[in-house]
Image (spheres, rainbow, N blue to C red):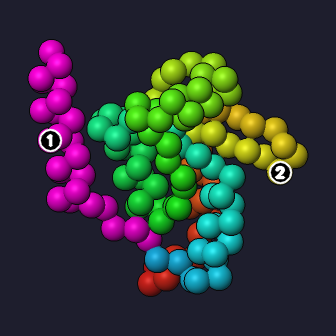
Amino acid sequence: MVIIRLILGKLILFFNWAFPPKGIKRLSKQQAQIDLQTASLTLYQYKACPFCVKVRRAMKRQSLSIETRDVKRSETARGELLAGGGDLKVPCLRVEGGDGQVAWLYESGHIIGYLEDRFVAGSNVVGA
């Protein structure tokens, strides 16, 4: 089973590398504002997890610069996820609000939906 997971993980990473999604183009001022907003977001993930790859591809399609932390390779990230989110499950998006409140979103579909609602809904896309 370990060998199968290793092979599948390598295939997922290869296809993600070989066929990257194109990001949307925004006006530079708007992209700078979005970059400021994404500074309060952190994605806890495993590099080869198919659901994590799905979220990272959605981030790339939306041209979102969100910090990622690999829970498998970092004890610090693993501890943060367990302490804050309460569950060692990935992907998990840490959302820090302006009032200091922190929300932890699990499930790739919920994370992608949140990102689309927050960043794509009113976007001025160049060339659109």
| Label ID, residue 98 | 2
Q: Is residue 72 above or below residue 87?
A: below
Q: Is residue 76 above or below residue 41?
A: above
Secondary structure of the residue carrying tag 2 is loop
Percent of width and height locating residue 53: 34, 43
Q: Is residue 89 magenta?
A: no
Q: Residue at x 69, y 52 (%)?
A: 40
Circle 2 Cα neighbour tier, 10 Å, few/some/many (<14 / 14–19 / ≥20)? few
Percent of width and height locating residue 24: 44, 71
Q: Are marks 2 and 1 in contact (CB under 8 Å)?
A: no
Secondary structure of the residue carrying tag 1 is helix
Kind of residue sitting beneath label 1: Leu
Segment colored magenta: 1-24
Q: Going by the picture, which residue comes out furthest to the right?
A: 99
The part of the image, by quadrant, that contains residue 120 is bottom right
Q: Could you tell whether 89 is left or right of 57 in the image? A: right
Residue 90 in sight in this render:
yes
Q: Residue at x 68, y 66 (%)?
A: 36
Query: Distance of mark 2 from mark 1, alpha carbons?
Result: 39 Å
- Magenta region, main secondary structure: helix
Kind of residue sitting beneath label 2: Gly
Percent of width and height locating residue 46: 39, 35
Q: Residue at x 47, y 35 (%)?
A: 74
| Label ID, residue 11 | 1
Residue 116 in sight in this render:
no
